[in-house]
Image (cartoon, rainbow, N blue to C red):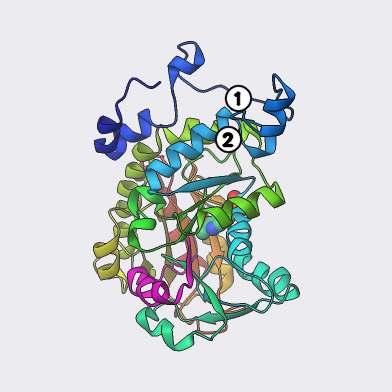
Amino acid sequence: MSKISAETRANLRSRSRLVHVGRNPQDQHGFVNTPIYRGSTVLADTIDDYEGGRNRYTYGTHGTPTTDALTDAWNDLAGAAGTVLTPSGLAAITVALLSVLGAGDHLLVSDSAYFPTRRFCDGTLKRFGVETTYYDPKVGAGIAELFKPNTRAVLVEAPGSQSFEMQDIPAISAECRPRDIAVVMDNTWATPLFFPPHERGVDIAIEAGTKYLSGHSDLLLGLTSANARHWPALNRCFTEFAVCAGPEDVFLGLRGLRTMELRLREAERQGLAMARWLQARPEVLRVLHPALPEDEGHAIWRRDFSGSSGLFSIVLKPVPRAAVAAMVDGLELFGIGASWGGYESLVIPFDCTRYRTATRWNPGGPTLRLSIGLEDPEDLKADLDRGFARLRATA
Ligand SMILES: *Cc1c(COP(=O)(O)O)cnc(C)c1O
């Protein structure tokens, strides 16, 4: 038994919660952390125990004390009835969608969704008889006009991948609930610390633990959490696919969890400082960051979110590609690479025009996505400052 009473636990603030949930030293001979349980076989004492499934653990794919530690903590943090752990964030998305959809069903997906989500909808889901319609992320309660008799789920993502549009998730959920249409959310950007998904009307929430839960660019992990209504189907689908995360990766997820709030708060602070500095640059047309008061989605962000992470985008004033390349290729502290949420800063160019179908992406200039790491912001500014000088010299 844990030393922390149920009452104390229920009232813990998020920072204390991250330190104390999902571990029980008394069960681990006093060691602070739950160790890595590696295992396929779990032995039963008797054939009665074996056949009766009376053991707490039955097989490696069905959970271990290590996976329980992280799922317990995540349920607590996200306000979920249950959570499953997958080998990547994308696997967390596919298992979420497969748990609610079947042949002949219709799915609505935000036009701003993470591109590989789209690829899965247009590929595997289509092959298995699920029809996907993309919608304007700003649709709000207007989502109801897109419902068909066979609409089973709506996928939301806020802010949008790369493009950072906000979505009115409570309004969308209010239309879905009475019709028993599942609201599935990719909540990777805010994490449950800054957006409690199930409290805001999300049925199934996805987190790429690869990003801020890891925080160190050394882990691939996905978490899918569900409310009570959707947990049995999610758990069943997960068990059928046995798409479980490996024990070392789960352990790294637990290790990251303890400092996630500290790192996120710092990412928020650094991200906003850099976003404001970029806003004032003459080479920058716009900064796409919902926590900035000038941002189109700011009112929704302020109403529904309690923080922002260190990932945002900028639109440059029109310059030739060679000028953007001169700027970005020569950066010394910003790496050019996919993923984000690590301790190191990253930058990538992006262009949503080639795949959008429900909306037109017309930002007005070249676009870059930045993930702000833990370097000193003055060093990051100096790096970008030299980059802008190269951009101007090439334009
Ligand atoms: C990175 C990312 C994912 C996928 O995570 P992986 O672990 O890389 O598969 C899903 N959604 C969003 C918004 C992401 O940025």
Residue type (three-letter) at the residue carrying disc 2: Val
Front in this rendered view, residue 331 or 4: 4
Quarter of the N terminus within the rendering: top left
Q: Which image quadrant shows ligand 1?
A: bottom right
Residue 391 place in picture, x, y as percent: 48, 65
Q: Which residues are magenta?
A: 160-185
Residue 197 vertical placement versus 182 (above, below): above
Residue beneath disc 1? 36
Front in this rendered view, residue 96 or 378: 96
Say the numbered circle drawn on residue 328: none
Say the numbered circle drawn on residue 250: 2
Provide the secondary structure element on which disc 1 rests: loop
Instruction: Inspect the magenta stretch and tell me whether residue 182 lies in it.
Output: yes
- Extreme residue toward the bottom, this view: 145
Provide the secondary structure element on which disc 2 rests: helix
- The residue located at (35%, 73%) in the rendering is 174
Cβ atoms at labels 1 and 2 below 8 Å apart: yes
Q: Residues within 10 Å of mark 1 (few under 14, many from 20)?
A: some
| Marks 1/2: CA–CA distance | 8 Å
Residue 260 place in picture, x, y as percent: 40, 38
